[in-house]
Amino acid sequence: MKAKAKYFLDTLSAYYPDAQIELCFNKKDPWQLLVAVALSAQTTDKAVNKVTPDLFKAYPTVKKFAKASVKDVEGYVKTLGFFRNKAKNLVAAAQMVLERFKGKIPKERKLLENIPGVGPKTAAVIIANAFGTPAIAVDTHVGRVGRRLGLTKQTDPSKVEAELTALFPKKRLLEAHHVLIFHGRRICFARKPKCLECPVVSRCPRVGL
């Protein structure tokens, strides 16, 4: 199974050499990454990227965010799904980061998951992208593509993560995360995947199709 996983990863990485996170944020600011990923839950990255420039301009630091009113933040993110809950969580998150972590985003996953609005997927994205800690965050694309390729049968994201983490080389987990998302967004759609364009179609079991 590891050999098959490596083949899929090698082939998809060659097909998507520029695969990377598609959210817009200051790459040197883990707080902005947290905000962007938290906002992306059940919303497209494109939709998030439309609101974050003005949001980060209004609240450029954790301290500014912590002092913001939830209502004001809502105004910037109202085009996104669950915007009221997200705005509330972000202000609470900023306050916690300021009070408990002296304004710095913690590098430990367990500490991150205690922050309002930060679940396992968001925490995995942060530690991998901001701090270089090997992790494969499981969103809807990673889960779907992983199952379709026959790399996992699990549907629970934490179980999918555990199985994929065991299959891919540790140092390539973030790479796997990015290429699986790219593949899910560009070819391996939930409905009507473009199998004729797929670079791994010859070895894909097409589970569920």
Image (cartoon, grey):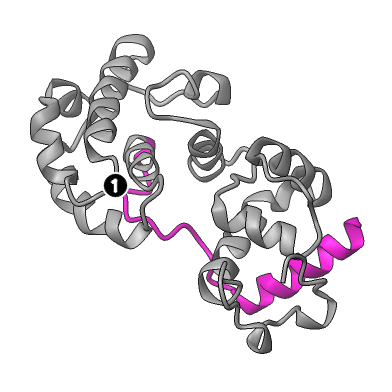
Instruction: Inspect the magenta stretch and tell me whether residue 14 lies in it.
Output: yes
The spot of residue 75 in percent (x, y) is: 10, 41
The spot of residue 116 in percent (x, y) is: 37, 23
Residue sticking out furthest to the bottom: 196
Quadrant including the N terminus = bottom right
Instruction: Inspect the magenta stretch and tell me whether residue 18 lies in it.
Output: yes
Residue 84 position by quadrant: top left
- Vertical position of residue 17 compared to residue 155: above or below: below
Which residue shows up at 14% across the image and 35% down it? Answer: 73
Kind of residue sitting beneath label 1: Gly
- Vertical position of residue 149 compared to residue 51: above or below: below
Which residue shows up at 51% across the image and 33% down it? Answer: 123
Kindly identify which residue carries mark 1: 81
Q: Is residue 205 left or right of residue 73?
A: right
User: What SS does tag 1 mark?
Assistant: loop
Quadrant including the C terminus = bottom right
The spot of residue 57 in percent (x, y) is: 13, 45
Q: Is residue 115 left or right of residue 16?
A: left
| Magenta-tinted stretch | 1-30
- Vertical position of residue 177 compared to residue 88: above or below: below
Residue 134 position by quadrant: top right
User: Tag 1: Cα neighbours inside 10 Å, few (<14), some, or many (≥20)?
Assistant: some
